[in-house]
Amino acid sequence: MIKAYIPVLLGSSRTLRQSVKVAQFILEQLRLGDRVQTELIDLREYRLPILEERLNEMSTPGPTVLQFCSKLGQADGVLIVTPEYKGGYPGVLKNALDYLEPQALRYKPIGICTVSSGGFGGLNCLTQLQLVCLALGGLPIPDKLPVSNVQELFDERGNLRNSAFKTKLESFIEELVWYTEAMINQKQVSKTPVQ
């Protein structure tokens, strides 16, 4: 069986970000199974410039822009981990997603995990990000993974303190993988010539 490629997109580049602990933990859990190929796409490492031209209008797009767009283009599904900033998603994430071609996430299931230091888990960010993903053709899965009080979820070394989160995460991952595999299978059926 071919493994689904589901990268984890970390939507923050801020110093001392807590969302990186969540993203790394999720990445480890995704790697435990044998159904998914994954990697961390950390926007801090990509350092994408502020969008001034659409990708198809650039005479010489930078290598990080091409690499970012290529990885999401190749993905079968995407798992976004992002903090909520001021009631919305970070500008660095919106800037990165704006580089994608229209419908770049078409037929790709999207799992959204939002992270907050407050008690609501970034629900405003989650709702807004669902709309952005839909505009790109993506299919946000029904299950959501809001993380409240992130500073209490992990210790200073990144070890999980709350086992209930792991249980919720396992269910979230299972749903994302199910939808992703269903879409992969449907794409294969669509390619099969009618007899």
Image (cartoon, rainbow, N blue to C red):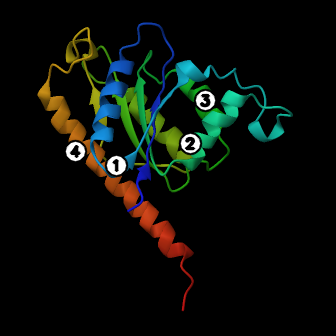
Could you classify mark 2 by the number of other residues whose Cα lies within 10 Å: few (under 14), some (14-19), or many (20 or more)? many
Which is nearer the N-term, disc 4 or disc 1? 4
| Quarter of image, res 28 | top left
Residue bearing the label numbered 4: 171
Residue bearing the label numbered 1: 176
Q: Is residue 11 above or below residue 74?
A: above
Who is closer to the viewer here, 1 or 63?
1
Q: CA distance from mark 2 to mark 4?
A: 23 Å
Residue type highlighted by circle 2: Leu
Residue at x-position 75% and y-position 28%? 62
Which is nearer the N-term, disc 3 or disc 1? 3
Q: CA distance from mark 2 to mark 1?
A: 16 Å
CB under 8 Å between callouts 4 and 1?
A: no
Residue bearing the label numbered 3: 96
CB under 8 Å between callouts 4 and 3?
A: no
Question: What percent of the width, then of the height, locates residue 67?
Answer: 64, 35
Q: CA distance from mark 3 to mark 1?
A: 22 Å
Residue type highlighted by circle 3: Ala
